[in-house]
């Protein structure tokens, strides 16, 4: 697979738009997205990317005795690796320019949608943004804040955004003593929403108004007619969230 480039995105004028998917135009090329295979082929790869690829293969894409279920820690990532549909990039984030960071990550969301298909194997497409050489505690707080702000926007677009870092305290779904979102570096992961993501959209700690929005997005993408949908469970969660208002 050739290198794929991240470009800065600017708004085009209304008379030049050709539909919703062309509302933004790519301009100057600024960085390169790499697949794990490309990183492993490099004579001297970026150390953070090399370590991240090892962590993905040895942890995320592998079973773990503390996981609480069979199969790999991440059910999708092994297939992403097989299909060569995982893209990585190292990013510097300025904690004092939060609005600019949010805007930049919005560009990555749009880029992911452009690169990824809409059906079939697209469910295995994923993008990981590794935070460059951060002070660990500061970066951990930053990626958690970013994820909280961006999750509604990503869910609305049919995507999930997850935050990983060394101190992540989010427990596993099947073992509360296992922490699957701990990683060697702070990072943000983007992928398509799947029907089994309902558990991540109904967390009681989230504001009920957020949960209502998440559940409407879920039911729009996974209605009762969809074989893998958990629509009855989603409707009940929606009812409970509405009762909390």
Image (tube, grey):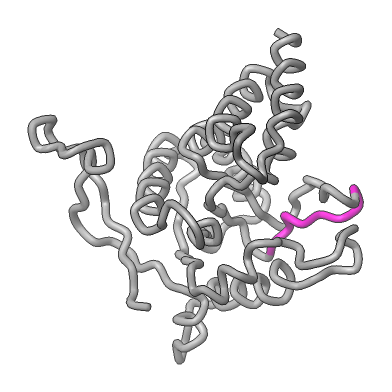
Can residue 172 be seen in the rendering of this structure?
yes
Inspect the magenta stretch and tell me whether residue 220 lies in it. no
In this rendered view, identify the residue nearer to me: 156 or 183: 156
Can residue 127 be seen in the rendering of this structure?
no
In this rendered view, identify the residue nearer to me: 191 or 93: 191
The spot of residue 152 in percent (x, y) is: 54, 31
In this rendered view, identify the residue nearer to me: 225 or 125: 225
Q: Is residue 120 left or right of residue 27?
A: right
Q: Which residues are magenta?
A: 176-183
* Residue 244 lies in quadrant: top right
Residue 227 drawn above or below residue 129: above
**Secondary structure of the magenta portion, mostly?**
loop
The spot of residue 17 in percent (x, y) is: 15, 37
Residue 132 drawn above or below residue 150: below
The mark total stands at: 0
Residue 57 drawn above or below residue 190: below
Inspect the magenta stretch and tell me whether residue 180 lies in it. yes
Q: Is residue 123 left or right of residue 240?
A: left
Give the residue displayed 37% in from the left and 78% down from the top.
Answer: 1
**From this viewpoint, which residue is outermost toward the left?**
15
In this rendered view, identify the residue nearer to me: 65 or 142: 65
Give the residue displayed 75% in from the left and 9% down from the top.
Answer: 243
Give the residue displayed 73% in from the left and 16% down from the top.
Answer: 239
Give the residue displayed 54% in from the left and 36% down from the top.
Answer: 221
């Amino acid at each position: 697979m050739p290198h794929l480039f991240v470009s800065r995105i600017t708004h085009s004028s209304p008379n030049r738009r050709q539909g919703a998917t062309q509302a933004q135009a790519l301009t100057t090329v600024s960085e390169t997205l790499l697949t794990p295979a490309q990183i492993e082929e490099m004579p001297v790869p970026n150390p953070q990317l090399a370590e991240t690829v090892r962590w993905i293969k040895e942890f995320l894409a592998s079973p773990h005795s503390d996981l609480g279920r069979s199969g790999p820690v991440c059910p999708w990532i092994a297939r992403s690796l097989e299909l060569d549909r995982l893209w990585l990039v190292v990013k510097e984030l300025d904690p004092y320019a939060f609005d600019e960071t949010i805007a930049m990550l919005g560009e990555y969301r749009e880029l992911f949608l452009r690169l990824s298909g809409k059906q079939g194997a697209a469910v295995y497409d994923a993008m990981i943004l590794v935070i460059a050489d951060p002070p660990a505690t500061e970066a951990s707080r930053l990626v958690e804040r970013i994820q909280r702000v961006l999750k509604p926007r990503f869910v609305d677009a049919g995507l999930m955004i997850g935050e990983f870092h060394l101190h992540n305290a989010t427990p596993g779904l099947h073992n509360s003593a296992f922490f699957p979102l701990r990683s060697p570096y702070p990072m943000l992961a983007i992928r398509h929403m799947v029907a089994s993501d309902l558990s991540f959209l109904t967390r009681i700690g989230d504001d009920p108004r957020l949960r209502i929005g998440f559940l409407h997005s879920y039911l729009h993408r996974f209605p009762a007619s969809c074989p893998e949908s958990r629509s009855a469970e989603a409707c009940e969660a929606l009812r409970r969230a509405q009762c909390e208002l």
